[in-house]
Image (cartoon, rainbow, N blue to C red):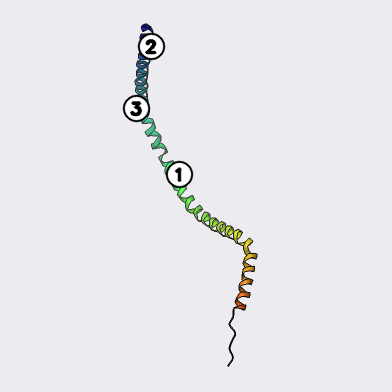
Amino acid sequence: MLELLAVGFFLMLGLLVFGVVAAVVLLTLKIALFVILLPFRLLKWLLFLPFLLLKGILALLVGVLVLPVVAIVLVVGLIAAAAALVVPLLPVFFVLFVVWLIMRAAARPVAVSR
Protein backbone atom coordinates (compact mmCIF):
# COMPACT_ATOMS: atom_id res chain seq x y z
CA MET A 1 0.00 0.00 0.00
CA LEU A 2 2.82 2.36 0.84
CA GLU A 3 4.39 1.60 -2.54
CA LEU A 4 1.28 2.91 -4.34
CA LEU A 5 1.44 6.16 -2.37
CA ALA A 6 5.12 6.55 -3.27
CA VAL A 7 4.42 5.87 -6.96
CA GLY A 8 1.58 8.42 -6.94
CA PHE A 9 3.77 10.97 -5.16
CA PHE A 10 6.63 10.57 -7.64
CA LEU A 11 4.19 10.66 -10.56
CA MET A 12 2.71 13.94 -9.32
CA LEU A 13 6.20 15.31 -8.64
CA GLY A 14 7.27 14.37 -12.19
CA LEU A 15 4.20 16.09 -13.66
CA LEU A 16 4.97 19.19 -11.61
CA VAL A 17 8.59 19.27 -12.76
CA PHE A 18 7.49 18.70 -16.37
CA GLY A 19 4.98 21.57 -16.12
CA VAL A 20 7.55 23.97 -14.69
CA VAL A 21 10.15 23.03 -17.31
CA ALA A 22 7.58 23.35 -20.11
CA ALA A 23 6.47 26.77 -18.83
CA VAL A 24 10.07 28.00 -18.65
CA VAL A 25 10.86 26.70 -22.16
CA LEU A 26 7.71 28.24 -23.65
CA LEU A 27 8.33 31.57 -21.91
CA THR A 28 11.91 31.58 -23.20
CA LEU A 29 10.69 30.87 -26.74
CA LYS A 30 8.09 33.59 -26.50
CA ILE A 31 10.65 36.15 -25.31
CA ALA A 32 13.11 35.09 -28.04
CA LEU A 33 10.44 35.38 -30.77
CA PHE A 34 9.34 38.75 -29.41
CA VAL A 35 12.92 40.06 -29.50
CA ILE A 36 13.58 38.62 -32.98
CA LEU A 37 10.34 39.96 -34.46
CA LEU A 38 10.44 43.37 -32.75
CA PRO A 39 12.36 45.09 -35.60
CA PHE A 40 9.81 43.80 -38.10
CA ARG A 41 6.96 45.15 -35.98
CA LEU A 42 8.63 48.54 -35.75
CA LEU A 43 9.26 48.52 -39.51
CA LYS A 44 5.62 47.65 -40.13
CA TRP A 45 4.49 50.60 -37.98
CA LEU A 46 6.95 52.87 -39.75
CA LEU A 47 5.72 51.77 -43.18
CA PHE A 48 2.01 51.98 -42.35
CA LEU A 49 2.16 55.25 -40.40
CA PRO A 50 1.31 57.43 -43.43
CA PHE A 51 -1.68 55.21 -44.19
CA LEU A 52 -2.86 55.46 -40.59
CA LEU A 53 -2.57 59.25 -40.73
CA LEU A 54 -4.49 59.27 -44.01
CA LYS A 55 -7.15 57.08 -42.46
CA GLY A 56 -7.49 59.51 -39.56
CA ILE A 57 -7.77 62.51 -41.86
CA LEU A 58 -10.38 60.76 -44.01
CA ALA A 59 -12.33 59.74 -40.92
CA LEU A 60 -12.29 63.34 -39.72
CA LEU A 61 -13.53 64.61 -43.09
CA VAL A 62 -16.27 62.01 -43.26
CA GLY A 63 -17.30 62.87 -39.71
CA VAL A 64 -17.46 66.57 -40.52
CA LEU A 65 -19.51 65.91 -43.65
CA VAL A 66 -21.79 63.20 -42.26
CA LEU A 67 -22.45 64.57 -38.79
CA PRO A 68 -24.71 67.46 -39.91
CA VAL A 69 -26.73 65.10 -42.10
CA VAL A 70 -27.16 62.71 -39.19
CA ALA A 71 -28.24 65.61 -36.95
CA ILE A 72 -30.85 66.76 -39.49
CA VAL A 73 -32.18 63.23 -39.91
CA LEU A 74 -32.38 62.90 -36.13
CA VAL A 75 -34.38 66.12 -35.78
CA VAL A 76 -36.75 65.12 -38.59
CA GLY A 77 -37.18 61.71 -36.99
CA LEU A 78 -38.02 63.26 -33.63
CA ILE A 79 -40.59 65.55 -35.27
CA ALA A 80 -42.13 62.57 -37.07
CA ALA A 81 -42.26 60.57 -33.85
CA ALA A 82 -43.93 63.46 -32.01
CA ALA A 83 -46.47 63.84 -34.83
CA ALA A 84 -47.16 60.10 -34.77
CA LEU A 85 -47.93 60.35 -31.06
CA VAL A 86 -50.02 63.55 -31.24
CA VAL A 87 -52.13 62.96 -34.38
CA PRO A 88 -54.21 60.08 -32.92
CA LEU A 89 -55.06 62.30 -29.94
CA LEU A 90 -56.45 65.17 -32.06
CA PRO A 91 -60.10 64.01 -31.76
CA VAL A 92 -59.75 63.87 -27.98
CA PHE A 93 -58.24 67.36 -27.94
CA PHE A 94 -61.11 68.62 -30.13
CA VAL A 95 -63.74 67.19 -27.79
CA LEU A 96 -61.97 68.69 -24.78
CA PHE A 97 -61.80 72.06 -26.56
CA VAL A 98 -65.54 72.00 -27.32
CA VAL A 99 -66.33 71.09 -23.70
CA TRP A 100 -64.09 73.92 -22.54
CA LEU A 101 -65.85 76.37 -24.85
CA ILE A 102 -69.28 75.29 -23.59
CA MET A 103 -68.19 75.51 -19.96
CA ARG A 104 -66.64 78.93 -20.56
CA ALA A 105 -69.79 80.22 -22.25
CA ALA A 106 -71.98 78.88 -19.44
CA ALA A 107 -69.82 80.35 -16.70
CA ARG A 108 -69.95 83.96 -17.96
CA PRO A 109 -71.40 86.37 -15.48
CA VAL A 110 -74.48 88.21 -16.52
CA ALA A 111 -73.76 91.76 -17.56
CA VAL A 112 -75.55 94.36 -15.43
CA SER A 113 -77.02 97.17 -17.48
CA ARG A 114 -77.27 100.62 -16.03
Q: Position of residue 60 (x, y in %)?
A: 45, 49
Q: Residues within 10 Å of mark 2 (few under 14, many from 20)?
A: few
Q: CA distance from mark 2 to mark 1?
A: 61 Å
Question: Which residue is denoted by mark 1 in the rendering?
Answer: 55
- Report the quarter where the C terminus lies: bottom right
Is residue 108 rendered to the left or right of residue 58?
right
The foreground one among 98 and 41 is 98
Location of residue 5 (image quadrant): top left
Indicate the position of residue 108 as horizontal and vertical percent values. 59, 80
Which of pointers 2 and 3 indicates the residue nearer the eye? 2
Q: Is residue 30 above or below residue 57?
A: above
Tag 2–tag 1 contact (CB < 8 Å): no
Q: Which tag is nearer the camera, tag 1 or tag 3?
A: 3
Name the residue carrying label 2.
8
Of mark 2 and mark 3, the one earlier in the sequence is: 2
Residue drawn at x 51%, y 52% as measured from the top left? 66
Marked residue nearer the N-terminal end (1 or 3): 3
Three-letter residue code for mark 1 = Lys
Residue labelled with disc 3? 35
Instruction: Residue at 61% x, 72% y: name it.
Output: 100
Looking at this view, name the residue that lies furthest to the bottom: 114
Within-10-Å neighbours for mark 3: few <14, some 14–19, many 20+: few
